[in-house]
Amino acid sequence: MLWRWVLVAVALMASSGCVTESADGRYAPAKADYAEAARINTQLGIDYMRKGETDRALTKLQRALEQDASFPLAHASIAFVYQNRGDAVSADRHYRRALALAPNSPDTQNNYGVFLCGQSRYDEALAAFERALRVTGYRTPEVAYTNAGVCARKAGKDAQAEGYFRAALRENGTFSNALAQIALLSYDRGEYLRARAFLQRYAQAAPHSPQTLWLGVRTERALGDVAAARRYANQLQQQFPEADETYSLLRTERNG
C-alpha cells in the first residue's frame, strides 16, 4: 500500500543564532537560566533527530527536561524520538504532557494522531487530527487532513478517508501526499480513470516516488494502455532499480 504519513518537523529558532556545545557535549549556561538552557538543548536534540542520531537526540532532550520540565516543545520532541525508537509508553506520556502544556499546538496534535494511528487507536487518532484542524490559524491543515485520511483507510473507513483527502486538496490543490493517496484509493475502488487523473496531477506537483510509479504501472495496465504502463515501468526501473516496487514489477513481468 502507498503508505506515507506526513510528520511535522518540530523547529525552534534559537535567539542567539548558532548553538554550540562545550567540550563534554553539554550546553552549560553562564547564568542559572535553565529555561533558556532547555530551549538550547531542545534545539540540539532536534538537530540530532534530523540527522538520525537518536541516541544523542535523546540525551539532549532528557537534559532539556531536567532544566525545564514545563517546556512543551521538549516533550513533543522527545515523544517523537521515543516513537521512532519503538517506546510507545514513553512516547504517549510525553505527547500527553506536551499537549497538556500547549493544547493548541496543531503540529503536536498532528504528530500525536500519527502515533495513535500507528498503535491502532484509530478513534483517538482521528480525534487528534480534528483537534489540530480546529486550531485557528493552522498553517498546514492539508497535512492533518491527509493523515486523517490515511488513518481512516487503515480503520477501514474509505468513504471518510476520501472526504479527508478532498478537504486536503481544497486547502492545497497541489499537495502531493493527498494526490497520491486519493489516486491509490481510486485505484483500489476500480476507478482507474480517476486514479490516472490524480496521478497526472501528482506528476505536476512533485517528482514521482517508487510507489506512485508502480501505481501508475498498475493503473495503465488496468486501463489497457500498454505504452503508458511501459513508460511508468521504464521510469521505475531506471530511477529506483533497488526499490521493492521494482522487484514487484519484475515479478509480474516474469509471471506474464
Image (cartoon, rainbow, N blue to C red):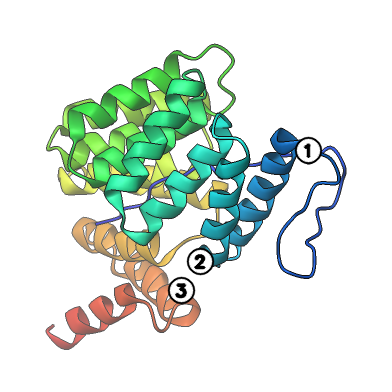
- Write down the quadrant of residue 12 in the picture: top right
Disc 1 secondary structure class: loop
Q: Nearer the viewer, residue 8 or 47?
A: 47
Name the quarter where the N terminus is drawn. Answer: bottom left
For the point 78% across and 61% down, which residue is it? 21
Q: Nearer the viewer, mark 2 or mark 3?
A: 2
Left or right of 129 in this view: 10 = right
The x, y position of residue 128, in whole percent, is 34, 25
Camera sees residue 222: yes
Amino acid, disc 2: Asp
Taking the image as shown, residue 218 lies to the left or right of residue 200, namely left
Residue tagged by mark 1?
32
Residue identifier under label 2: 55
Badge 3 marks a residue whose secondary structure is helix
Q: Between label 2 and label 1, give the one nearer the viewer.
A: 1
Quadrant, the C terminus: bottom left
- Percent from the top left, x then y, of residue 139? 59, 25
Give amino acid for label 3.
Answer: Gln
Residue type at numbered disc 1: Ala
Q: Nearer the viewer, mark 3 or mark 1?
A: 1
Q: Is residue 176 left or right of residue 246?
A: right
Residue at 40% in and 53% down = 82
Question: Residue at the spot x=51%, y=57% of the render?
Answer: 58
Q: Which mark is residue 235?
A: 3
Q: How many marks can you see?
A: 3
In the depicted structure, whether residue 217 falls above or below residue 240: above
